[in-house]
Amino acid sequence: MASPLKQLRYRIEWLAIKLMSVVVPLLPRGGIQWLANALAFAAFRVDAEGRHTALANLNAVLGETHTEDQRLEIAKQAYRDFARTMLDQFWSSRLNAENYLNHIEVVSEDPEAIEQAKESGAIWISPHYGNFEWTSLVMGFRGFPFTVVAQDFKNPLLTDLFNSNREVSGHRVIPQNGAMLRLFKNLKAGGHAAFLTDLTIKPGRTATIIDCFGLKTCVTTMHAGLQRKLQLPIIPGFTIPLPNGKYQLNILAPLKLKDGASDQEITQACWDAFETHIKENPTPWLWMYKHWRYRPEEGGDNYPPYAQISSPFNKLEKSLKGS
């Protein structure tokens, strides 16, 4: 049980977020952009850890192709994009199936395959890139109700607030405990599930190691395991901010996977679907996140300083090489 002081802090956090959930939907779109820029300006200067992480990540990935000033500007823009995404998480209560196209353009690489997926069910994937909250939300308005696994907040009072926003277009948010079985049953019945595939997790039974911008990172294989068992299409998508204040949702064609692909190969293919797009337009990615918490024992000089050698990570890496 949380201490009285922590309970008080949780209550204050809840009141602040609750106030945002009431006030933010009242703002015009121009007000959202102005407030996002102001919050990002302050956050970039106050959030020392996040700022250092973003610059370390950018140096590791873009150090040879972008100058220090260019990387600094990308980090600042990443804060602005993330602030806008968070504000729009609350502003989304104003969206519905009739008006969402006023705020977001939808581009689909293979519309026929997407319509087929409406009948068969599908596994939908996205990274923490652009407005990843609206990527999911908009698909609900388009007739694809997702089951989404969400990590609970440390402050339990916040979980319901955020989940209610994520369910406004017909989605169902479920906790991590028992998620695999619930997802399997839903997908087998022709449903849809959505995953953020660039979350770093601890090496374990449902984890694998992939190459991400030439660096190794440890991510979940939950979506890959479900695809292998059910042979459903995996459809990537991402939403980027546009200069006019709107967004563009890009729905890519379903992944082409080789027969008998392993969890690691499927997971790598999922990341590969996004890497080129992030290279071409790096600012919307969540650079403030520690994408490389672990590094190999050898050849780790190019990793960000926060990356640590991990025995479980090395053990997993050796097992993948031997498989």
Image: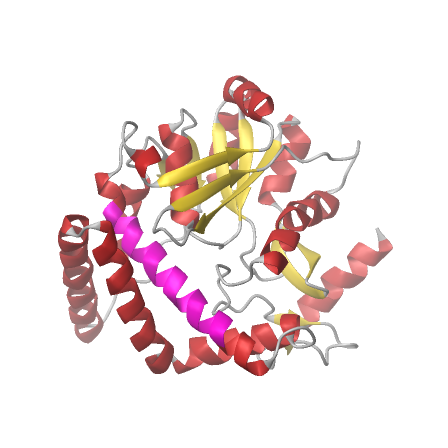
Residue at figure coordinates x 38%, y 36% from the top left: 138
Residue 177, horizontal then vertical, whole percent: 44, 45
Q: How is the image coloured?
A: secondary structure
Q: Is residue 149 visible?
A: no
User: Which stretch appears magenta?
Assistant: 73-91
Residue at figure coordinates x 22%, y 72% from the top left:
6
| Position of 149 relative to 304 (above/below) | above
- Image quarter of residue 18: bottom left
Q: How many marks?
A: 0
Question: Is the N terminus in the top left, top right, bottom left or bottom right quadrant?
Answer: bottom left
Q: Is 76 one of the magenta-colored residues?
A: yes
Q: Specify the principal SS of the magenta part.
A: helix
Residue 124, image x, y percentages: 53, 37
Asked if 112 appears above or below 172 in the picture, the reply is above
User: Residue, x 40% and y 54% (percent of image)?
Assistant: 243
**Residue in front for this viewpoint, 156 or 84:** 84
Q: Is residue 27 visible?
A: yes
Q: Position of residue 234 (x, y in %)?
A: 61, 34
Q: Would residue 41 appear left or right of 323 to someone viewing this image?
A: left
Task: Depth check: give the residue in front, 45 or 149.
Answer: 45
Which residue occupies the extreme right position in the image? 322
Quadrant in the rendering for residue 211:
bottom right
Residue at image x 66%, y 30%? Answer: 229
Does residue 123 appear to the left or right of 19 in the view shown? right
Verify whether residue 42 appears in magenta.
Answer: no
**Residue closer to the observer: 216 or 276:** 276
